[in-house]
Amino acid sequence: MKDIDALVSFCTELAELSRSIIRSHPIQDMGHEIKEDGSPVTPVDREVEQRLRERIDARYPYHGILGEEFPNRDTDAERVWVIDPIDGTKQYATGIPVYGTLIALAEARRFVLGVMDFPATGDRWIGGRDYPTCWNGRPVTVAQCTGLCRATVARGDSDRGSAEENLGSSRLTDAGSFSICGAGSYGFAMVASGKLDIAIDIGLDPFDFAAPVAIVEGAGGSATDWRGRPLTLESQGRTLFLGNPDLLGSVVDLLQA
């Protein structure tokens, strides 16, 4: 992308705005409500997304926007911004600090640039197709685990999964060296940073995985669904992030067994 420097600068600007809004609201004062789909939302979720949309509209009015809390617009545009104002709202509403803002840019339906910002920990990842991933300004690359028996695995919330999905993810975690549960998008970022080898999840929407796709791929990893297909704006549900793309075939076989 010829304008990659301008886009990276703009992503950083959006992340700084989101972080400042989230940090301005004391956690102990935060209430939440339950949406029709059963997921929680706080006033800060809506405030962050509204402010980010306003900033995007002002800078790139011809780009589309897909977000979690407000209606999408122009999602058939060549470039579409994908926003999750607070990924991990359950954690945010209960004061557990692994929540963050996820912002991505899709071009021709593929995720080409992403930023993941975690206000509570002060961590930020940014990277994508034409911008190698950095963690707090330092370049990072994925680990090169060559065998499932040595792999560290992060799995998502098993309460969301069907019996079939939970069986598949259990087979994968049993095959690895050890596993953790409930890391959310922070686990995806740790695949990009070489601290985890595999991260899987279920029941996700594009705003949940768009930024992690760009960031993991920008660090040399692989981001697909459970059948090994690329994740796009049309994808839903099951996600698979790998540090070493050479593991894809064996992991997909295990998940689909």
Image: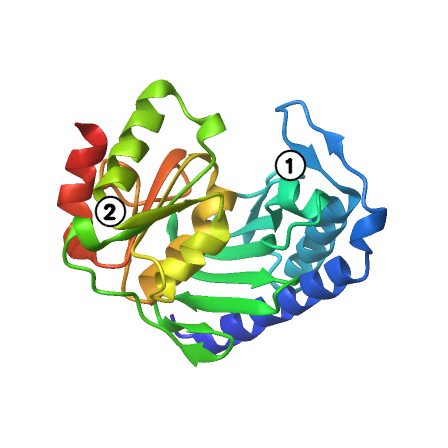
Q: Is residue 46 visible?
A: yes
Quadrant of the image for the N terminus?
A: bottom left
* Residue depicted at 67% across the width and 53% down the height: 53
Q: Are marks 1 and 2 in contact (CB under 8 Å)?
A: no
Q: Which quarter of the picture shows residue 214?
A: bottom left
At horizontal 42% and vertical 26% (from top left) the residue drawn is 161
Q: Disc 1 or 2, which lies upstream in sequence?
A: 1
Q: Residues within 10 Å of mark 2 (few under 14, many from 20)?
A: some
Element on which disc 1 rests: loop
Q: Position of residue 201 (x, y in %)?
A: 40, 39
- Compared to residue 81, the image places residue 219 above or below, namely below
Residue 76 appears anywhere in the view: no
Q: Nearer the viewer, residue 154 or 106?
A: 154
Residue 11 lies, in percent from the top left, at 56, 67
Callout 2 amino acid: Gly
228 sits to left or right of 13: left
Left or right of 239, for residue 210: right
Residue at x 37% of width, y 51% of height: 108
- Residue 39 quadrant: top right
Element marked by disc 2: loop
Q: Residue 176, labelled with which disc?
A: 2
Quadrant holding the C terminus: top left
Q: Position of residue 175 (x, y in %)?
A: 21, 41
| Image vertical order of residue 30 relative to residue 117, above or below | above
- Which mark's residue is nearer the viewer, 1 or 2? 2
Residue 31: name its quadrant. Answer: top right
User: Which of 70/3 is in front?
Assistant: 70
Tag 1: amino acid: Pro
Q: Give the labeled residue for mark 1.
A: 71
| Mark sitting on residue 141 | none
